[in-house]
Image: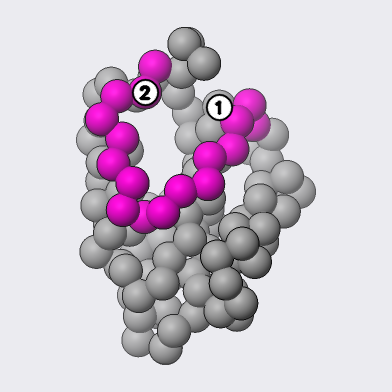
Amino acid sequence: MGRYNIIFCVLTYKNSNDLKEFIENLKGNNKINFSYKIIVINNYADETTSQLIKEIAYKNDCVFIESENKGYSYGNNLGIKYAKENFEFDYLIVCNPDTYIIEFDFNNI
């Protein structure tokens, strides 16, 4: 269990490149002033993309959850439940992997 300012629940489906860019954007953004954890929920499509998304998640210290592909809300709800059971946090953000954060001042929330 850890303590973070923000938990990101990111639902993926065959979009490993978007996930990599999302993670790199957060890691490399010097305008972010908060602690965070990323939970990657993969809506299963096939073994090849699932394995690739899993590797990206683990390589970047993200939580990885494999989900039956029962839709957007089902997958997000798995991530939210996991976050609530395993972390302490101030805020939880549900987003797609093609989200790009340019600037985010945590102190202004």
Residue that mark 1 sits on: 5
Helix, strand or loop under label 1: strand
* Left/right of residue 93 with respect to residue 1 in the rendered view: left
Q: How is the image coloured?
A: one colour
In this view, which residue lies farthest toward the bottom? 47
Identify the residue at image location x=32%, y=69%: 15
Front position in the image: 101 or 20: 101
Under mark 2, the amino acid is: Phe
- Spot occupied by residue 37 in the image (x, y as percentages of width and height): 50, 42
Residue 58, numbered label? none
Residue 7: x and y, percent? 55, 40
Tell me if mark 1 has few (under 14), some (14-19) or many (20+) residues whose alpha carbon lies within 10 angstroms of its own. Answer: some
> Could you tell me which residue is drawn at 35 percent across and 75 percent down?
14
- Above or below for 88 versus 98: above
User: Who comes first in sequence, dot 1 or dot 2?
Assistant: 1
Q: On the image, numbered disc 2 is attached to which residue?
A: 104
User: Mark 2: which secondary structure?
Assistant: loop
Residue 75 in the image: state x and y as whole percent: 59, 65
Q: Which residues are magenta?
A: 89-105
Front of the two marks 1 and 2: 2
